[in-house]
Amino acid sequence: MNAETTGTVLTVKTQWWLKVNTKSFRKGPLDGATFPHVIKVAYTVDGVEYTRRKWIHAGAPCPALGEKCQVVYQTENPKKSKVIYW
């Protein structure tokens, strides 16, 4: 069975080592470059706080620090979860 709660974004880190080029012709090394992000979300179930990391693709909207997002977790094992951020 699945349950739902809200989580808070703790960290937002840019993955600088993975550059995605969006232009076929660039004038500089970072012209048209986008980078993916990794966010860390904290959520609480029955008084126990859990954390979950989520990879966000390059070019997708990234949530801000402290923003609320939706977390779906298994009721029998709350560590198994999925972060839904849009």
Image: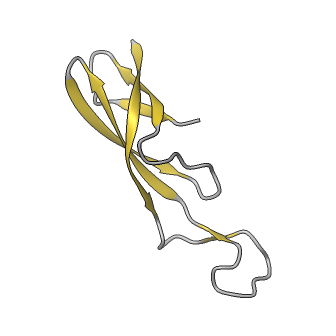
Position above or below: 51 against 39: above
In the foreground, 57 or 11: 11
Q: Specify the quadrant of the image occupied by residue 7.
A: top left
Residue depicted at x 75% and y 83%: 26
Residue depicted at x 39% and y 12%: 1
Q: Residue furthest top?
A: 1
Q: Quadrant of the C terminus?
A: top right
Residue depicted at x 48% and y 71%: 16
In the image, is 23 to the left or to the right of 20? Answer: right
Q: Residue furthest front?
A: 66
- Residue 70 at x, y percent in the picture: 47, 28
In the image, is 33 to the left or to the right of 4? Answer: right
Position above or below: 83 against 3: below
- Residue 79 at x, y percent in the picture: 28, 30
- Residue 11 at x, y percent in the picture: 37, 51
Residue depicted at x 35% and y 20%: 74
How many marks do you count on the picture? 0
